[in-house]
Amino acid sequence: MKTLPTVRPAAPEAPDAAGAPLRQWELVGILVLVLCWFWLRRASVYNHPWDSDETQHLHVVWGWTQGLIPYRDFFDNHTPLFHLLFAPVFNLFGERPDIVDLARWCMVALAGLVAWCTYRIGAQVFSRRTGIVAALLCAFYPSEYFKTGEFRTDVLWTVLWLATLVLLTKPRLTRGHRFLAGLAFGATFATSQKTVLLALVLLAGSLLTCLLIRAGKRRSAVPPGAVPSPAAAFTLSFWLGLILIPGLLLTSFYLEGAWSQMVYCVIRHNLVKVAGSEPPLSWSDLRNLRFWLIIPAAIAGWLILDRSTERDRAGRQVWVLMVGGSYCTLLLGIWTVVSAQDYLPYFPVALVGAAAGLSWLGRRIVRRLPRHPWVPPLLLAALLGPEISWLVKSMHFSDRRNRFRVEQIREVLALTRPDEPVLDAKGGSVYRPRAIPYVMETLTRLRMREGLLENDIAERLVARRTAVAINLSWFPGATKTFVDRNYLYVGLVHVAGRPVQPDADGTIRFRIEIPNRYVFIDASGLVSGRLDGGQAGDRFEVEPGDHSFQPGRPLSGPCDVLVESAYNAGFTPFNTELQALEPLRKVVN
């Protein structure tokens, strides 16, 4: 007699099963945790140390507000959507030294969306409680918490990626859902070129899911054809949505004459191979446990297909696990330069899987110990407690480095006009054009080190009569030497000038490399006299070269030749108020 395939019956639901309404104490606990999250976020906005990427992104946003076109008018190696969207908000703030703090409040809203999308994925694919647990774990996970609080493209990138997953995991996927998912994923491409990695993750996750489904058809648990293929989501509607936003942006830059510059800045500049460097997949990557998460994810997916009777949900559950499991395998396997923010799209999806495992464990405990319903919340507390403690321990509730950056921007604004360039590694002045076309970030420095990019910074400073320089730690040694020779450290910035000493006959002989208007100053104030035997005066246009100055009075001590704009703004080496900022300078340097 032929035996019919059997389907394992679903276990009876526990009293605290997924569909049960939340208890009052659960709602109160969630509210307390949300308020705690907001309080911690407020502290982080003002005290978490500024990252140089934040001012770099704000500088690009400022460029948009000035009517400049990225890539054509100034360098940026990111795709443009993030900066374009925040330009109207930036315009509302005006010129403010504390602009990073204000911009971070926008990131708080996006971080909230990250948590909300994490909840939606967990709720749609597993259960409402799983979604809540995943959102809470994600909200307080330190590696996710700190980077989503910074003003960077990666935060919007993560939100759009999660929005794509929310739409693709809908229980009843309509044509409109597919179109919106494509639209969100297209916006993800327009926000960061690293979306190439996310596309590979979607492809790998879908292929692995299809393989598990095909293998499951040979088993008796799930009837053949019962689990829908994830490929069904990627129809024409999805592809039409995908090309819309990138197509509009690419067309706009082409019409503005910025096509070739955009290709270089966004693609070619970021593709740099360093001689002697480790391959993308190195021994250290293989020792990283995240690289191997695809294996337990595949095992969990196999078990879900083997035991679940909810066929449509089982397919979506396996797909989410495969997407989350394959992320780090691909990131560590093919990415050349891996940074902390590259993991932002990974943590929410991985924590959905972790929350699902925790919920499964909690239900099994409640079935075995029905008189102890407090055990699952205790499990959650055992995870959240150390997580929040680790988060609080890692926080900066008072950081003087932020005050240094605020005061430094304040000084730059006082010293320069909006059209005057500043020697600035990545855009730390925010509101002033850089004296050099490129950004001194990791890839630029690698290109200079490998001889792929000429170090002509000194020549550009001379050509643009650059009077102010800041944040020199990212520059090559030759540039630092040039700045030390031609600039004075006054307050928290470097201004064009140099210390000078009179000869035995009282004549001051010196060399200037940065052309500009200069004054001579000592502790008593301006020193008038004759420059190169010309007419007497106290302000002089000085061209590059060797010069002599005959003071009109005896000097009262050390003397400096200083760019006139710094003197007019009160930025002199003898200003006692600026000397009081010396402790701040030591904090950063």
Image: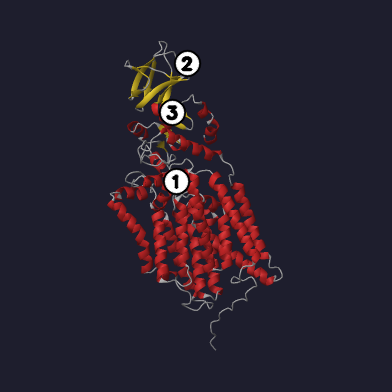
Q: Position of residue 190 (x, y in %)?
A: 38, 55
Q: CA distance from mark 1 to mark 2?
A: 45 Å
Q: Position of residue 93 (x, y in %)?
A: 44, 46
Q: CA distance from mark 1 to mark 3?
A: 35 Å
**For mark 1, does the 10 Å Cα neighbourhood hold few (<14), some (14 to 19), or many (20 or more) residues?**
few
Residues marked 1 and 3 touching at CB (< 8 Å):
no
Q: Which residue is mark 1?
A: 93
Which numbered disc, 3 or 2, marks the residue closer to the eye? Answer: 2
Answer yes or no: is residue 237 visible. Answer: yes
Residue 63 to residue 182: above or below:
above
First reached walking from the N terminus: tag 1 or tag 2: 1
Residue at the far top: name it: 505
Q: Which residue is mark 2?
A: 556
Could you say whether the residue bearing mark 2 is in a helix, strand or loop? loop
**For mark 2, does the 10 Å Cα neighbourhood hold few (<14), some (14 to 19), or many (20 or more) residues?**
few
Could you say whether the residue bearing mark 3 is in a helix, strand or loop? helix
**For mark 3, does the 10 Å Cα neighbourhood hold few (<14), some (14 to 19), or many (20 or more) residues?**
some
Q: Which residue is mark 3?
A: 484
